[in-house]
Image (cartoon, rainbow, N blue to C red):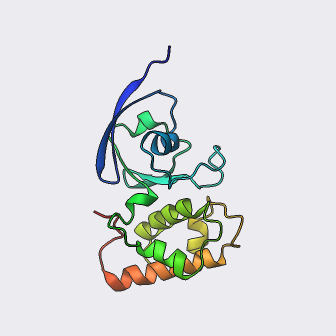
Amino acid sequence: MTMKRAITVTVNGKQYHSEVEPRTLLVHYLRDVLDLTGTHVGCNTSQCGACITLLNGEAVKSCTVLAVQADGGEVTTIEGLAPEGSLHPIQEGFWEKHGLQCGFCTPGMIMASYQLLKNNPNPTEAEIRKGLEGNICRCTGYQNIVRAVQYAAEKLQASTSEPVSAGD
């Protein structure tokens, strides 16, 4: 008999109360319990970055975080970046600059880019590459991803002097 644990997590601004097995990974909680399938399961070893979400405002690889560790916390997924249905400037950048092909790595790349731009609103190309080095893309060759992040940085700077915001 498996003992379940009650957790309360705010995901994309909505509070959820759930019972989970203590070994449930955050990525599986998001996908299987909350049906938020934008966060992808890639390698399950924290190598690829496809599962990046924000936990209490910091980017984490959700395949290495237990759902019980998020208890009482706030999680933002790719679905939460633009809750009104419009694209967040980072998402728009990936669209406009062809920063995706198959799209598998894209949610993790976007969430890692979000963290990068939150900490460094005007990164150099080298800083963008360094900021995304924990993410693997097997399709694009990364140049268009870098362009997408540059596009988003410019757009965010032009639209506001406030820090990047996830639908707050």
Identify the residue at horizontal 50%, vertical 55% (top origin). Answer: 38
Identify the residue at horizontal 48%, vertical 61% (top origin). Answer: 111
Q: Which corner quadrant of the image does residue 148 belong to? A: bottom right
- 71 up-or-down from 101: above or below: above
Q: Which corner quadrant of the image does residue 122 belong to? A: bottom left
Identify the residue at horizontal 62%, vertical 78% (top origin). Answer: 144
- 60 up-or-down from 95: above or below: above
Q: Residue furthest top?
A: 1
Between 131 and 62, the one nearer to me in the picture: 62
Identify the residue at horizontal 35%, vertical 54% (top origin). Answer: 12
How many numbered discs sit on the rendered protein? 0
Q: Is residue 115 visible?
A: yes
Between 101 and 75, the one nearer to me in the picture: 101
Q: Position of residue 105 (x, y in %)?
A: 61, 61
Q: Quadrant of the C terminus?
A: bottom left
Q: Position of residue 53 (x, y in %)?
A: 47, 53
